């Protein structure tokens, strides 16, 4: 009788080293955020009483900016997405990718540029300052979040529903309000939530315009008032708010795939706008690109040419590149393990993915505050010595990993979506262990996505300001810190060069991102 020599599939309960490493990654990503909540709950009553006014003012300021700036960004992004997706007008094909460019500039870079352009001595007669100036910067700088999500929702809609509305005589406005907008509402809400999370996390622009938000209140409590417990309490409130926004965004994204009609792909019907409406659409999209990117970029370039002192930029540039490379590599390794573990439908994988998302939702100042609190606890226990340069850099890279792991998980997960479940099951049946499947199946398939994730992480770390301000070693400046220091001293001419470099560095992943926008709909080339 012939013997069955087929390999036996490993037991479901066999040791999974990938799951163990994913659990460690979960701890790394979640520890600072959890520390913020734990230390905030254990802080004293005196700080809590003092924190009443500061916390109230910060919460009201953040809420007002979210409503005005975030609402404006959502409206601008949704309107632009509708125009380029379902209308014909001059320049539509160019605006498809040009509208994403403002995503390359952090809000604080736009703030420094507009401050120099419109304040005393600038060429603009209209001053961009105060609450409304900051809300304007958020609206024109963050609308790409809503634009990308809304565009993805519009291009994935059923052609049948739109054609049926047109056949029944509905005009473009009626089709938008009654058909396209209701179908795209979850995607628009997801993009708007992301823009609002960015507003809640921003420190540099709010501080430069003198607005009290939760992010600026954290710095004021820690440095101006010398109350770390109060800073942790405010951080906890901001963290909880960020998690709520993350839950809203994920719930909206989960519903964003709804569409009706035929499953057979057909090109979306586009409306030919009247000459006046077409000119208005071109002017609207042009205004978004000009005010969100081209005008501040051109002004920064002019100022940088007026102050070409390269020797002041080289050390911060070298520090930024070193930190961004080290942080991107470490964060990429964590993100790869989390992405692979989450696809295997294990409890550890799902927990790791949520922990990474929680870190990304939390502002950099909150994660840095949690990391400082944990290092303080370790110092009291005698596990570490003074907070020297090496320890500060370690804490900073840890903060980057906890903050941006989710930004690496998303593209890697998209790359792994091409992996058939049957392929992984076949490898497991043939006796391949978790690490062998990870190295020989998962990583090769996700290699292009790994490169994209590394690029995104590099730029995200390069732009990060509040965490770097809190944790950097003494006399260790990055481009973001240098631009902030110059702008804080009202030396906006000197702040132009580092701000411009940050802006230009963000353009590369934006170009990579926009290459996939035209392919967002099935059958599109």
Image (tube, rainbow, N blue to C red):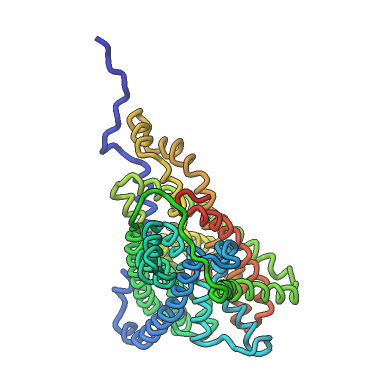
Q: Residue at x 40, y 77 (%)?
A: 231
Q: Position of residue 130 (x, y in %)?
A: 52, 87
Q: Residue furthest top?
A: 1
Q: Residue at x 52, y 46 (%)?
A: 448
Compared to residue 58, the image places residue 167 above or below, namely above
Q: Nearer the viewer, residue 136 or 227?
A: 136
Tell me how many marks there are: 0
Q: Position of residue 229 (x, y in %)?
A: 37, 77
Q: Nearer the viewer, residue 356 or 287?
A: 287
**Residue 368 picture quarter:** bottom left
Q: Residue at x 60, y 58 (%)?
A: 508
Q: Is residue 246 visible?
A: no
Q: Nearer the viewer, residue 198 or 189?
A: 189
**Residue 276 picture quarter:** bottom right
Q: Residue furthest left?
A: 1
Q: Position of residue 50 (x, y in %)?
A: 35, 87
Compared to residue 514, the image places residue 118 above or below, namely below
Q: Quadrant of the N terminus?
A: top left
Q: Position of residue 69 (x, y in %)?
A: 46, 79
């Amino acid at each position: 009788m012939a013997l069955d020599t087929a390999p036996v599939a490993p037991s479901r309960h066999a040791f999974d080293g990938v799951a163990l490493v994913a659990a460690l990654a979960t701890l790394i990503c979640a520890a600072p955020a959890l520390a913020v909540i734990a230390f905030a709950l254990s802080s004293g009553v005196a700080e809590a009483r003092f924190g009443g006014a500061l916390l109230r003012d910060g919460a009201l300021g953040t809420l007002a900016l979210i409503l005005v700036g975030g609402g404006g960004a959502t409206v601008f992004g949704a309107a632009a997405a509708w125009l380029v997706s379902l209308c014909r007008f001059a320049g539509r094909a160019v605006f498809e990718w040009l509208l994403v460019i403002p995503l390359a500039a952090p809000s604080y870079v736009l703030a420094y540029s507009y401050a120099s352009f419109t304040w005393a001595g600038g060429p603009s007669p209209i001053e961009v300052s105060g609450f409304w100036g900051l809300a304007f910067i958020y609206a024109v700088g963050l609308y790409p979040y809503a634009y990308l999500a809304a565009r993805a929702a519009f291009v994935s809609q059923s052609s049948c529903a739109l054609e049926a509305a047109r056949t029944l005589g509905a005009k473009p406005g009626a089709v938008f309000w009654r058909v396209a907008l209701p179908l795209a509402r979850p995607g628009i809400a997801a993009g708007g939530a992301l823009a609002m999370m960015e507003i809640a996390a921003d420190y540099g622009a709010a501080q430069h315009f003198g607005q009290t938000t939760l992010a600026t209140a954290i710095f004021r409590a820690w440095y101006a008032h010398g109350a770390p417990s109060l800073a942790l309490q405010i951080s906890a409130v901001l963290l909880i708010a960020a998690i709520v926004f993350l839950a809203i965004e994920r719930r909206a994204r989960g519903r964003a795939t709804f569409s009706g009609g035929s499953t057979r792909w057909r090109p979306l019907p586009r409306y030919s706008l009247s000459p006046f409406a077409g000119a208005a659409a071109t002017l609207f999209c042009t205004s978004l690109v000009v005010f969100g990117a081209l005008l501040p970029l051109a002004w920064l370039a002019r100022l940088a040419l007026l102050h070409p002192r390269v020797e002041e930029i080289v050390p911060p540039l070298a520090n930024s590149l070193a930190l961004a490379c080290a942080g991107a590599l470490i964060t990429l390794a964590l993100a790869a393990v989390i992405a692979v573990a989450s696809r295997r439908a294990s409890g550890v994988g799902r927990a790791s993915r949520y922990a990474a998302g929680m870190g990304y939702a939390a502002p950099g100042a909150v994660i840095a505050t949690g990391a400082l609190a944990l290092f303080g606890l370790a110092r009291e226990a005698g596990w570490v010595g003074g907070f020297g340069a090496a320890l500060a850099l370690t804490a900073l890279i840890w903060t980057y990993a906890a903050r941006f792991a989710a930004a690496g998980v998303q593209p890697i997960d998209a790359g792994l979506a091409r992996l058939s479940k049957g392929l992984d099951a076949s490898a497991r049946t043939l006796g391949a262990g978790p690490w062998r499947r990870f190295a020989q199946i998962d990583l090769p398939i996700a290699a292009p996505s790994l490169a994209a994730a590394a690029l995104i992480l590099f730029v995200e770390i390069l732009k990060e300001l509040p965490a770097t301000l809190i944790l950097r070693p003494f006399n260790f400046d990055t481009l973001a810190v240098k631009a902030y220091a110059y702008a804080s001293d009202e030396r906006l001419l000197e702040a132009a060069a580092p701000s411009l470099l940050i802006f230009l560095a963000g353009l590369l992943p934006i170009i990579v991102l926009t290459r996939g926008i035209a392919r967002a709909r099935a059958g599109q080339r």
